[in-house]
Each structure stands twice: as C-alpha cells, then as structure tokens.
Amino acid sequence: MTHPTIASFDRVAGQLAVGGVPIDRLATRVGSTPFFAYDRRLLTARIEYLRSTLPDGVNLSYAVKANPMPAIVQHLSNLVDSFDVASALEMRTAMDTPIPAERVSFAGPGKTSEELTQAVAAGVTIELESETEAARIEGIGERLSIRPRVAIRVNPDFEVRGSGVRLGGGPQQFGVDAERVPALVKQLISADMEFLGFHVFAGSQNLHADILADAQRKTVDLVLRLAEAAPEPIRYLNLGGGFGIPYFDRDEPLDLAAVGANLADLLEGSIRPRLADVRVVIELGRYIVGECGVYVTRIVDRKESRGRTYLVVDGGLHHQLAATGNFGQVIRRNYPVAVGNRLDAPVTEKVSVVGCLCTPLDLLADKVELPAADVGDLVAVFQAGAYGLTASPTAFLGHPPAIEVLV
C-alpha cells in the first residue's frame, strides 16, 4: 500500500517530482546529494486545508522550530497569521518577513539575557516560562524604557495522553505551574508590563482527534479560570497545537474535521461569551510542514552480507536523525521511503538502507521492500519537512551538510 504522503507528491515519467521537477533533474539542479527538498505547492495546500477546516475565528501560528529554513518562513509569512520562535536566530528570521513584531511570540525555557533584551527591543510577545524570567524582563524593560509585551506559558494541571512528546502536566521545565499563575499575573501588571494572556501547550505529535478535543476543552476551562483572576481582560490565548502526522504504516491520519468542529464549539460556546476580544491561536509546526518535504540521498554502494542486502547511501542520521529512530522512538519503525527515480518499477527485493557513518545507528530503513536499486539511484525519505536538518547532529564525523531547497 502506498503511503498517503508519497501519493500526494507529483510523478513525472515514473519519477518522484518535487514542485513538478523530476528527482534526477532536481539532483542535478541542486548540484550534489544529499539534500532536503520542500514542495511549495504542498505547503500552500496544507494551509488552505487548515483554513477550510478550522473555524474562522482561529488564528494560525507557525512554530518556526519545526523548520526554520528562511525560504519556508518567508513563504509562510503570506499564509499564516503569526510566528512562534524559540531562539534569537529564529526571531531574526521571523522579523525579516512581513509578519509584524506583535504577531511574533518567543517561547522556550532558558532564554538568555541577550535574547530577552533583543525580544523586548523588537517588540515581540515573550511567553514567560518562570517568575525569574519575568523579573529579568522587568529589569530589561526599565533599562530600555520599553514596556515589554508578555504572556504566560502555563504548565497545566492535566496531562495529555497519546502525545509523542509531553510538554505539560506534572513537574516541567516548560511554563509556570497553573496554581502559581494568578500571583504572577498580578506581579506583571504591577510591574507595568503589557500582559496579553496565556499559552498552554501540553503535548505534540498526537493523531487522536478525541484526545486533542479533550485537551482543548480542559485548556479552555483552565484559561477561563485563570482569566477570572486577571485584573484586566486577556487579549491573547494560544491553545497550542500538537496535531500529528502519520509517519508509519499503521498510523491513521488525524481527523482534522473533528478537531475543527470541537474548536468551533469551544469558540462559540465558551470562549467568545467570556473573552470577547481575545485572539485565539492554534500553533502548528510539524502539521504544516512535515509532509511537504523529502530527504534525497544517493546510493553509493550495494552489498550483500550473509543473506542480507544493504543499500549504502551518501546521507544518514547526521542530516535526518528522526528517520533512523533515534529522535524519540521507543520502538524503531521505518519512515516511508522510495527509490525516487524508479517509482513505477515493481517491488522485487527486501533491503536495508544505511548511511555513510561509522555507527550501526545509521539505519534509514530496515528490511523494506523496494524496486531493485543500484549505485547512482536516488532514495527518498518522506515525512522529512519537520525536525530534519536542524534536529540532527550535523557535525558528527565531519561529513558535509545537506542542502535545502524550496521548489
């Protein structure tokens, strides 16, 4: 069965095509392998799908950490409502786009004084992770004679099941514990900061619409309680995201329509009656860009070892760590892969695709069924649009970096 992401890409003369360009021609155009290729058409289509399915009153924010390639951020600046960044470099990338500073939020623990100073000077919304961070920002604002724009990232008093990474509930380095938030709100207002509202993000990579809906309901209930304790109306409510994409054969795509219907109910039934002027944000990264990219690497050797066939490629985990199973997988499973220049060829063999690094961890695909392939053929690893190059140990063993292109 063809993985739905593979089917969504174009085919030209039996080859995978990214942005309408056949993969062998694209490799020549790029000049070398390995490389990441992102499909502009698919990226735009994903935003259109989100806009058509989520309620009109919800703003879309792109989490730049999912893929901070400047060309992608520039492209999305014309399609989304805001950006969320997690470092000063990501903030500068966002600020180079038409998105205004007040629509850029800066989240993440461990922000340095230099980063906070840049953020206050830029006028972005700083999402506070602790009381200590709040005190540092107060001092920076006084020194610069600028009133900082802040929101509180809340560590909720509930956990979300079914998430790939848990970012809320229990003790966390992320956010301020919900029970401590009312006191911090009063501190912010007395310090003459521009307090905007709350951000609650409890988990990522969730494929279960019912679990996401339950988490959103609990999040709204929590925020409404916190808003009652705020001395002035809140204007910003980031409900997080956590929308997952199907990486493996047994994964079912997220039922976005069900998520959208639940959000519509919450918006009309709970949020608007109580918080009339609040800007409601859904923050997505992986869901926007993850399925729009492929990692392309060339076979440099084919070898047999005691009955097992290996296709050795010029890429590996130093570019695409997640596909090797070393980026959060408990049980290793294969990402969808294909011989990109032989899409129409019959499947004839079971092989393992391994990278060029001197470690057995460098396994891009284990015992997968593919068409017969040899030296010079191009292997495409799908679901490579998010947490690829920047989430990989690019300096490991000194191999050259992968190129990125938006086609």
Image (cartoon, rainbow, N blue to C red):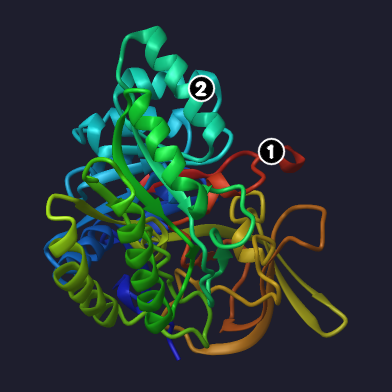
Q: Give the crowd class for mark 1: few <14, some 14-19, many >=20 residues within 10 Å.
A: few
Which amino acid is tagged 2?
Arg
Of residue 71 and residue 404, the one placed in the foreground of this image is 71
Relative image position of residue 330 (x, y in whole percent): 70, 73
Q: What percent of the width, then of the height, locates residue 4?
A: 38, 81
Q: Earlier in the sequence, mark 2 or mark 1?
A: 2
Mark 2 vs mark 1, foreground winner is: 2
Residue in the image at 69% along x and 62% along y: 326
Determine the residue positioned at 25% across, 47% down. 236
The answer to which of 348 and 280 lies nearer the viewer is: 280
Q: Kindly identify which residue carries mark 1.
A: 395
Which circle marks residue 59 in the picture? none
Q: Which mark is residue 136?
A: 2
Where, by quadrant of the figure, is residue 39 drawn?
bottom left
Q: Label 2 to label 1, Cα distance in Å?
A: 34 Å
The N terminus appears in which quarter of the rendering?
A: bottom left
- Classify residue 301 as left or right of residue 385: right
- Any part of residue 69 in sight: no
Up/down of 301 relative to 304, above or below: above
Say what secondary structure mark 2 lies in: helix
**Badge 1 amino acid:** Ala
Label 2, residues with CA under 10 Å away: few <14, some 14-19, many ≥20: some
